[in-house]
Amino acid sequence: MPLELLQRLDRLARNLTPLTLTFLLVIISATPLRIPDFGPVAPNVGLIAAYYWGIYRPDLFPAVAAFAVGLWQDVLIGTPLGMNAMVLLAIHWFILSQRRFFQGKSFAVVWWAFALIATAMAALLWLIAMAYHARLLDATPAAFQGVLTVALYPFLTWVFARIQHAVLRQA
């Protein structure tokens, strides 16, 4: 193989890293754990990824990636098709519109904003689920999912930052 082709393949692999990593994390988060009632409260890793990559590498995580991850999440966890896709597209749009605000801010500010967004998205997903099922649903699982998502954000941000530094610095 010519060197130029190998370089193109390397660049393509690096550019697909955020999307591939996000798809893998969604698979892991949807994997059944033998923990009773964990599924409805599992952290929304797609939301964390869309938020992080939207701030730090929107060139490698465009709207179509957010939509694809949301559909993938819907298929794996059994939510109505398009529910998470719509939410991740909304997050993507919001982050892109506010990206200048987030640039250069401390981790605490970015995490605080994420906590607000994750809380709003958990409430929105709960409302959509109630509309879909046409009945009142208990808000406790949605609240726990929001809390777990916010709590997991620092760890996944650390992982994403390490990957961004190691793999994507040349992309």
Image (spheres, helix red, strand yellow):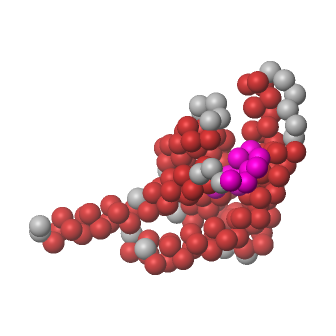
Q: Is residue 54 visible?
A: no
Q: Position of residue 115 (x, y in %)?
A: 79, 59
- Asked if residue 31 is positioned above or below residue 79 in the image, the reply reads below
Q: Which residues are magenta?
A: 34-45
Q: Position of residue 111 (x, y in %)?
A: 75, 66
Magenta span contains residue 76? no
| Residue nearest the observer in this picture, 54 or 98 | 54
Give the farthest residue toward the left.
Answer: 1
* Total residue callouts: 0
Give the side of residue 150 with respect to residue 71, left or right: right
Regarding residue 30, the answer to whether it shows in the image is yes
Q: Pick out the residue farthest to the front.
A: 34
Q: Residue at x 67, y 71 (%)?
A: 155
State whether the magenta stretch is mostly helix, strand or loop.
loop
Question: In the picture shown, does residue 159 fall above or below 95?
Answer: below
Q: Position of residue 101 (x, y in %)?
A: 70, 63
Residue shown at 58% from the left, 72% from the top = 159
Is 153 left, or right, of 46 in this rendering?
right
Q: Quadrant of the C terminus?
A: bottom left
**From the image, which quarter does the N terminus lie in?**
bottom left
| Residue 150 % position (x, y) | 76, 61
**Foreground pick, 38 / 132:** 38
Residue 132 position by quadrant? top right
The answer to which quarter of the image holds residue 95 is: bottom right
Residue drawn where x is 24% and y is 69% of the image: 7
Q: Residue furthest top?
A: 134
Question: What residue appears at the point 59 percent right and 38 percent down from the top-left corner?
Answer: 74
Query: In the image, is residue 43 part of the stretch drawn in magenta?
Result: yes
User: Horizontally, is 21 left or right of 127 in the view?
Assistant: left
